[in-house]
Image (tube, rainbow, N blue to C red):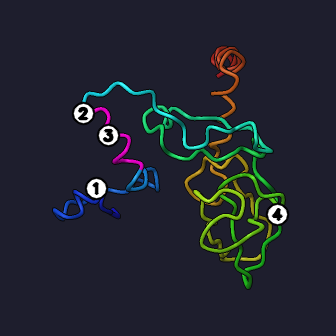
Amino acid sequence: LKTRSATPELFARGLQVPEMAGLLPRTGSFARAIVPRVAGVSVAAPRAFSAWAERANPVYPSPWNKWFPYEPIPSTPKMGPYKVQCSAKEGYQFCTCGESTTQPWCEAPGKRCGKMKDFTPRFYQPDYDGTKYMCGCKKAPGTLCNGQCAILWCDVNPWTAAIGGFGISFVF
């Protein structure tokens, strides 16, 4: 189980928290999200990106973003995987912001994303040559698609998902 410090204050005391598949917020966001509640101040929490209308792709906040409103939310360029040919001899920079025009790859590889500075490209080195299914919804913890797009589709279309789940319950 990998661990990392949660806040600078906890880091100074040497406390560590488990890192669950990259789901913990970054240091600064965790501290900002907790402080208003601890101080008892009732303040509306602004989103990290209040100008969602400026984005080229839709933004779907998850229940995680309700608990941690200061976390940046990636755009969702596609509700499904990208089918791409990859070579094991080559390294790729996976886009994590969802705004790159060369999806699923980042158009400005480096330490920070070229379009949205709160995101960093994720390096991907395939083990074998062949077809890979890369995450298109930007909700999976890794670069490869793990089916999170199906959960996102159910979040966006709750009535259709409920009716489909009810119908499937009679089949199986």
Measure the C-alpha gap from mark 3 to mark 1: 15 Å
Disc 3 secondary structure class: helix
Q: Which residue is mark 1?
A: 17
29 vs 150: above or below? below
Q: Which disc, if any, is residue 139?
A: none
The type of residue carrying mark 1 is Val
Disc sitting over residue 39 in the figure: 2
Give the quarter of the figure containing the C terminus: top right
Taking 86 as reference, is 56 above or below it?
above
Closer mark to the observer between disc 1 and disc 4:
1
Between discs 1 and 2, the one toward the N terminus: 1
Which callout, 1 or 4, points at the residue further toward the start of the chain? 1
- Give the amino acid type for the residue marked by disc 4 in the picture: Val
The x, y position of residue 164, in whole percent, is 70, 19
Q: Earlier in the sequence, mark 3 or mark 1?
A: 1
Q: Secondary structure at mark 2?
A: loop
